[in-house]
Amino acid sequence: MSLWSIVSHMPSEQFSGLFDEFPRSLRCLLADWLENQPWEFINGSDTFCTSVASGLLSAMLEKLRSTAGGEGQQCQILQQVSSIEKIYQQDPLRLVAVLRAILEGEKTAVIKTDRHLPLSFHRRQEEMKFSLGLQRLQHHVHEIQALRDSPTAALSLNPRDPQMTAEKKPLENELSTLILEAVKELETAKQQVLKRIQIWKRQQQLAGNGIVFEENLAPLQKRCESLVEVYFQLHQQVMAASAELGAELLPRLLERLNEVLSSLVKSSFLVEKQPPQVLKTQTKFQASVRFLLGPQLLKASAKPYTVRADMVTEKQARELALSAYSNTLSESTGEIMHNVVALETNPTSGTCCANFKNVLLKKIKRCERKGSESVTEEKCAVLFSTTVALTPGNLSVHLQVLSLPIVVIVHGNQDNNAKATVLWDNAFSETDRVPFVVAEQVPWEKMCDTLNQKFMAEVQTTKGLLKEHNFFLAQKIFNDYSARFEDFQSRRVSWAQFNKEILPGRGFTFWQWFDGVLDLTKRCLKSYWSDRLIIGFISKQYVCKLLSTEPDGTFLLRFSDSEIGGVTIAHVIRAKDGSSQVENIQPFSAKDLSIRSLGDRIRDLGQLRNLYPNIPKDQAFGSHYNTEEQTGKDVRGYVSTAIKMTVESERDQQSLSAAGGPSQAHPFGQPMLQPELHLENMQSVLSPICPPAPFGPQPIPTGYPTGESNVNMVVSNNLGSSFSSPSQMLSVSLVTDPALPHGSDLPAFRNPLPFMPSHYLPGETSQLLSGGPLPEPQDEEMPESPPFPLVESLLQSPSQWMLPPSVELPPSVELPPAPDFDQFLPEMAVEGPALGPPFVPPQQHSGYPSPNVSCWGLGEARWDDSARPGHA
């Protein structure tokens, strides 16, 4: 963005008196061209500044003549151009001063309004300053050459001519002055190059947190090569004038020149592609280093060079930095495989690089940690090193460069805390720091910017965090819910608050919670967030305040405050007395949303009507609904199924209890296991129906569903959960075939036997039938399968123990007489191992209705073909 693109939209009154000597109409015609000229850096009245000003005046007059408008204003513009040429032709430096004042006035007005200038403007300014400095340096070199080649200088510097002895001293002084001034200009240009390299490195580090930067090193390489070329020209002039400079001045000049070259060469050895900043052992990674001056200084070398990669600790990195990388590494802190590659020059691209493609960190040696520092706070780095011989002169130079700080982990569960260390270091480290020192406390405003950049980069969205989001995050990290938003702007947040101290009442740190939100949004909620359908960062208490006055069915989405990586739906319901209540559905995890998307879950829930404040849910989420759900049979002849979500609210449960329905029934319909049953003494009883194989055949459920279109299965996964709730129901819609016999479609999981496994795959009916899986079902008919023979015999004799009254034991099972049965059970409880714990309803700790539709029972085991009957 140019400066004029902003100024042209500002009121002209703000620039009164600024265009008295230079018409505003001409400023409009010149626009960006005027800003791309170094008016601000032409300081002085020497021959160089005068020649540059004359060249700029001629270029401007030509630009104005070529851009003159239509017939009507062309005459007026040409008159203005002629007037300018007449005024400034004899004094072009006056024009420079006028245009410098105009640009300064425009910048002041923009800063006053917007508080900052465009970044592109600053970048152009820096480039123009360096370019003009390089031109000035080349001008000085030409002056030195001209002075040495002049006839007067040749005569005066001839020691055999006694007539010129009187003129010798002034010429030597003038030559020394020119060379000293040129060397000073060279050192200034070198500092500008080194500063630009440091800026590039800093931008590369910030890119680790998601900030976009210009990775292309070609402009920087061109700048280095141009300066080195001028260096060699100046060095040649100094050596040619060695006799005139004297034995005292020459060594000092050569020392300063050598320091310039050494700094440029060492600083131009860069890590172009950084290794991963969270690096796991036994994992391959890639990296590359680039020598910007390699194509220029190594082109005549026939010797192949190699670059070595070694792991160094923070202490070793500090020692290398303090010695200005003049020392070589004594010992690597880790074992790295494939760590030596060739430094190759590509004539086509003009680059000199060493590419590490299959590097493997085999192991790491941990160093002593300070205080309460954990392994995920320990920082190290990869040191890339090589030794090259530069031409001309065949000067040997040792090159070393450190990568960005790296946290080495050995297990995936360390990744989260390691990312926190890297994020903090990338965001808040200084440019010229001692490795790897970083502030322990930073302004909260900077932390907000860091979290915002990280969020947008990870989620890959242009919609960042809002002021309200930052307010909630501040309340959370500072544990202060009474302060105003402005009060947090002056506060400082510490590393301990960020990722060491556990949040009050929680089991995780602030960063662990925030990273869980990042992961969930990136994986499942990117489009919802980008459409601003998720408020997300808002407290549960404030949600109640927002929704308490809204109509029934109003809802919003927020990130769970008590779970890592969860999003919940808060909605308004009306009690029987007409009062409003806000219910929060148990948070959905990424696993839940991979089973059924958030949009489809919202569509399933009829009690949700309007997204806060008043947007119909179909209008808000319609584009996120899944329109590919099928009914009927698929191409293989299978009956299609669809998962639907329903949530039972407390009001629904109260109504069900008042109507005489089961209020505390186990959601699986399973009877509770007796607490004192032991397997060893029951083996003779269980063996006919429960073989000892770990995934043996299980008794089939009694009964089959009729031709109903929906079978509702109550699903709850609240065991061990802190969420209480009204249970959630998973509705599996079965589109049945009218051609099938009535009652032979699918088993109903209503009243399984006591030893029915706790986790079934919906739809895997063949694993519940005797003799293993049946052949593929035919479209025309599906004959009814007989039950297990032993189970059939059980159903023919009355039970004298845990089986239902309608189920009888086979004749081969002998039980003690009825009077002794009461004694039989206690004996089993004493002698044998426990068959299993009794079912205890889960502890209820919150008001979330449970939405988890992914689990059938107590365990996580699943049946597969290898575990079905006949396939053990």
Image: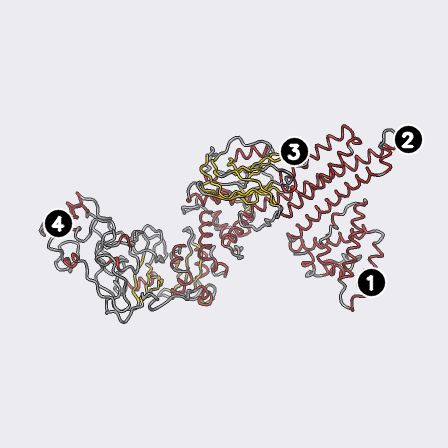
Q: Is residue 428 above or below residue 663?
A: above
Contact check, label 3 and label 2, Cβ < 8 Å: no
Element under disc 2: helix
To which residue does mark 2 refer?
163
- Nearer to us of marks 4 and 2 is 2
Of the numbered discs 4 and 3, the one sitting upstream in the chain is 3
Element under disc 4: helix
Q: Which amino acid, by three-letter code, is at mark 3?
A: Leu
To which residue does mark 3 refer?
395
User: In this rendering, would 661 be left or right of 237?
Assistant: left
Spatial separation of the CA atoms under disc 3 and disc 2: 43 Å
To which residue does mark 4 refer?
822
Spatial separation of the CA atoms under disc 1 and disc 3: 61 Å
User: In this rendering, would 150 be left or right of 206?
Assistant: right
- The residue at the point 79 percent across, 36 percent down is 177
Q: Is residue 838 above or below residue 232?
A: below
User: In this rendering, would 861 be left or right of 611?
Assistant: left
Residue 305 appears in the picture as rendered: yes
The quarter in which the N terminus is drawn is bottom right
Q: Which amino acid, by three-letter code, is at mark 2?
A: Gln
Q: Residues within 10 Å of mark 2 (few under 14, many from 20)?
A: few
Of the numbered discs 1 and 3, the one sitting upstream in the chain is 1
To which residue does mark 1 refer?
79
- x and y, in percent, of residue 528 in the image: 47, 60
Spatial separation of the CA atoms under disc 2 and disc 1: 58 Å
Contact check, label 1 and label 4, Cβ < 8 Å: no
Spatial separation of the CA atoms under disc 4 and disc 2: 138 Å
- Nearer to us of marks 1 and 3 is 3
